[in-house]
Amino acid sequence: MTKKIILDCDPGIDDALAIVYAAGSAELELLGITTVAGNVSLDQTTSNALRVCEFIGAAVPVTPGCAAPLLRSPITAEHVHGADGLRGARLPPASRRPQPGHASDFIIETVLGAPGDITLIAIGPLTNIALALSREPRIAFEVQDFVIMGGSATRGNVTPAAEFNIACDPEAASIVFSAGWTVTMVGLDVTLRALADQEVLGRLGALGALADLLLVPCLGGYADDGIGPPAVHDLCAVAHVARPGLLGCQPARVEVETAGRWTSGMTVTDFRASPAEGNALVATTIDVPAFWDAVLEVYGPLAGSLNG
Ligand code: BDR
Ligand code: CA
């Protein structure tokens, strides 16, 4: 049975890769994309989501959400993803328009319209999700699953303690982790192992237009840590929903630091928590070869359909 998903994102190169997977996977039914400010501005993340969908022929509604974090000034990552968020991509501008309305309304209406059926995946700052929860706390109990790319039990990437999506809007992340649901946290502990190295680029490079116009130029210009091959963080979260065996997760209690002088945005992870205290499943292992095989299994047929 396919899993119905909503993808909340801030494209962003690895978000674009995640959109392609979500739209192409036979195991997933992508009901809608919601966008948030993060890697680049909201206008740009929305336009990028539309461009990617149109390029791959995915008629998915794209609904914009929050243009700034709940309380803080925006921080962005143009140095990683390029000024337009998809550095290197050779996609035409989108001709489709975003949906009217707000992402948080789309999330609330879609989740409450199909109780127990929808998996919500968030791969950007958690502002839209926090807003949706604040307006309609019942969504925490009506989703089938809630999965994020964000945080880490062991390290940060924008500071020694904080991962980008959490660091952007720690107050939103704190609301999200306190909502009474179980957050599956696909964080840097696993995503930093999913590297698009030369061997992977070789496999992706054989995919025709999908490779030539999106995957290869974007991954070539993706300055994830500026040192080694880039990590495809967001793709890990979506692949996990489609193929739960790829990642190993452990129960934990996660608290988001909102006040620390050195640790703001840290996801403080306690694996010693009792089941009653737990609020998260934290990904700690990833089968990297199986992950890339799964990605190629999805991208291959989709690329074939684009190549005619
Ligand atoms: C996360 O930050 C963003 O730059 C990526 O798109 C990903 O969601 C990784 O820390
Ligand atoms: Ca992202």
Image: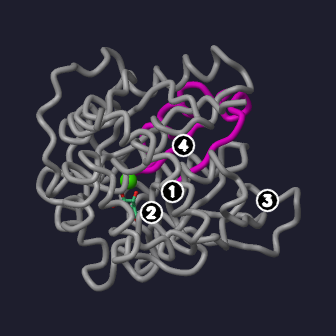
Q: Nearer the viewer, mark 4 or mark 3?
A: 4
Magenta range is 120-148
Residue at x 53%, y 39% (from the top left corner): 25
Q: Is mark 1 within 8 Å of ligand 1?
A: yes
Q: Earlier in the sequence, mark 4 or mark 1?
A: 4
Q: Earlier in the sequence, mark 4 or mark 3?
A: 4
Looking at this view, name the residue that lies furthest to the right. Answer: 275
**How far across and how far down the image is residue 102, in percent?**
37, 23
Query: Which amino acid type is marked by label 4?
Result: Ile
Which of 173 and 156 lies nearest the eye of the viewer? 156
Q: Quadrant of the C terminus?
A: top left
Query: Which amino acid type is marked by label 2?
Result: His
**Direction from residue 86 to residue 263 in the image, left or right:** right
Q: Is mark 3 within 8 Å of ligand 1?
A: no
Which dot marks residue 121?
4
Q: Which residue is mark 3?
A: 278
Element assignment for label 2: helix
**How far across and how far down the image is residue 15, in percent?**
37, 50
Task: Answer with the quarter of the image where residue 166 lies.
Answer: bottom left
Report how far apart the C-alphas of labels 3 and 1 lie in the structure.
18 Å
Which dot marks residue 233?
2
Report how far apart the C-alphas of labels 4 and 2 lie in the structure.
13 Å
Report how far apart the C-alphas of labels 1 and 2 lie in the structure.
7 Å
Which dot marks residue 258?
none
**How far across and how far down the image is residue 262, in percent?**
41, 81
Report how far apart the C-alphas of labels 4 and 3 lie in the structure.
20 Å
Q: What number of labels is visible?
A: 4
Q: Earlier in the sequence, mark 4 or mark 2?
A: 4
Element assignment for label 3: loop
Is residue 73 visible to the viewer in this orientation of the structure? Answer: no
